[in-house]
């Protein structure tokens, strides 16, 4: 391997280290400048590549991080609130179910008491007649079942008895259910009729408890409507495209990505500050001057020195590459010269061969003439 290529490799490594050192200095300077600039607008030019454009880019990145952070916090609060709502809604539904069950039992007790009274009111008289009919049917089915239990007999009687027993039990269960529904209806109608004034009889306690439960169920229903509406609104804000947890992760990844891009933006402003102060490009020296503290000039001097060293290394690399290229070109010239000599030797050999072939052609043509003359000549005197 050419030793000079090894030297170039060492110079490239030295250049890389110098660039890294300079970039870190300018990144630090750029970050400090952004902090000192704050909300000010020191740059009038915002075209691409200008300090103003870099400042806009930096503020856009900051805003995106701030907006994403707010969105994450909002989503987290929505998730917490949704869990609270789901828990409260489930608790209300459970409580309502229990209360409705308890209320149904009270209605049944009140219905039994009302229909069992010796003198039911006119409103409950039709229900009293239905109760009596159902009680008669229930008694009939119970007697029928008792009779079937007492029956004996063979296998066929046993099979028939089982079928009849199943029918009687089904009818008994249905009539009992219908009776309970009747009591429930009677209790509900009774409570509706005494809504404005509680009775002063033995039903007062159940009636008071029933009205208390109804008020509680109504209050819970109103709360449930409100909670479900709030849940619906939060669900609309969160959306259905992806889960809140997935959206939070996506926002967090975006924030992390933006933070990784900050050093490059710091370097841009630091480099522009160094270039503007050095050349006063577009009045940059004056624009940056008020934000460069005592450490600013020192950083710029170090960065300029490093840039000079980098330029020297680049120049050395270019010179060595040029020397290598010269040697390569010279070697190419020598190769071509040798190729020319070889070609000329081939040309000389070819010319000699051509001359030899031409001489042979001439001799052959002369011989042909002699033979033709012989053929055309007078040969009469010859034996």
Image (cartoon, grey):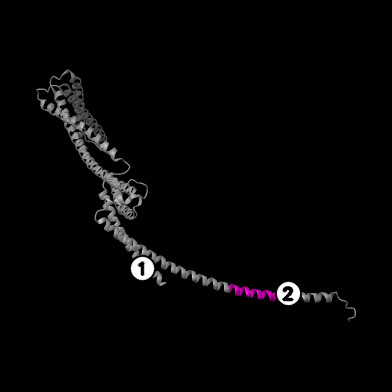
The residue sitting at 34% across, 62% down in the picture is: 308
Label at residue 361: 2
**Quarter holding residue 196:** top left
Q: Is residue 378 left or right of residue 191?
A: right
Q: Which residue in the rendered view is the most extreme toward the right?
A: 381
Quadrant of the drawing holding the N terminus: bottom left
Q: Position of residue 23 (x, y in %)?
A: 31, 58
Using the rendered image of the protein, determine whether residue 110 is visible from the camera's viewpoint: yes
Circles 1 and 2 in contact, beta carbons < 8 Å: no
The residue sitting at 32% across, 59% down in the picture is: 304
Label at residue 10: 1
Where is 188 relative to 250, above or below?
above
> Is 254 included in the stretch rendered in magenta?
no
The residue sitting at 29% across, 57% down in the picture is: 300
The residue sitting at 57% across, 74% down in the picture is: 341
Q: Position of residue 147 (x, y in %)?
A: 20, 31
Q: Is residue 327 left or right of residue 188?
A: right
Q: Position of residue 7 (x, y in %)?
A: 38, 69
Using the rendered image of the protein, determine whether residue 258 is visible from the camera's viewpoint: no
Q: Which residue in the rendered view is the most extreme toward the bottom?
A: 383
**Quarter holding residue 247:** top left
Query: What range is drawn magenta here?
Result: 342-360
Q: Secondary structure at mark 1?
A: helix
> Is 356 included in the stretch rendered in magenta?
yes
Q: Nearer the viewer, residue 339 or 297?
A: 297
Q: Nearer the viewer, residue 358 or 109?
A: 358
């Amino acid at each position: 391997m050419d030793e000079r290529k090894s030297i170039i490799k060492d110079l490239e490594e030295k250049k890389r280290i110098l660039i890294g050192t300079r970039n870190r200095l300018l990144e630090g300077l750029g970050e400090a400048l952004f902090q000192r600039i704050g909300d000010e607008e020191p740059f009038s030019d915002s075209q691409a590549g200008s300090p103003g454009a870099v400042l806009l880019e930096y503020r856009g990145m900051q805003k995106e991080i701030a907006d994403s952070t707010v969105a994450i916090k909002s989503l987290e609060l929505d998730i917490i609130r949704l869990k609270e709502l789901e828990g409260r809604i489930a608790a209300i539904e459970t409580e309502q179910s229990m209360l409705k069950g308890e209320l149904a039992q009270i209605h049944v007790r009140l219905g039994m008491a009302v229909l069992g009274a010796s003198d039911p009111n006119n409103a409950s008289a039709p229900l009293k007649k239905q109760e009596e009919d159902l009680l008669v049917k229930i008694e009939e089915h119970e007697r029928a079942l008792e009779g079937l239990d007492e029956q004996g007999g063979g296998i066929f009687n046993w099979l028939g008895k089982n079928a009849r027993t199943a029918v009687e039990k089904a009818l008994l269960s249905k009539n009992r259910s219908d009776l309970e529904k009747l009591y429930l209806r009677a209790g509900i109608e009774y409570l509706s009729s005494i809504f404005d004034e509680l009775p002063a009889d033995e039903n007062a306690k159940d009636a008071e408890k029933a009205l208390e439960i109804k008020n509680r169920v109504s209050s819970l229903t109103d709360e449930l409507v409100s909670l479900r509406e709030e849940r619906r609104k939060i669900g609309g804000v969160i959306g259905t495209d992806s889960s809140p947890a997935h959206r939070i992760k996506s926002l967090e990844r975006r924030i992390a990505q933006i933070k990784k891009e900050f050093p490059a933006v710091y370097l841009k402003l630091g480099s522009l500050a160094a270039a503007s102060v050095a050349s006063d490009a577009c009045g940059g020296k004056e624009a940056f001057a008020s934000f460069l503290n005592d450490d600013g000039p020192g950083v710029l001097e170090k960065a300029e020195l490093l840039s000079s060293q980098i330029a020297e290394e680049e120049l050395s690399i270019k010179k060595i590459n040029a020397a290598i290229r010269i040697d390569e070109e010279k070697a190419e010239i020598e190769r071509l010269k040798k190729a020319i000599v070889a070609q000329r030797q081939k040309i000389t050999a070819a010319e000699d061969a051509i001359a030899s072939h031409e001489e042979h052609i001439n001799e052959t043509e002369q011989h042909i003439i002699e033979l033709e003359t012989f053929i055309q000549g007078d040969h009469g005197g010859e034996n």
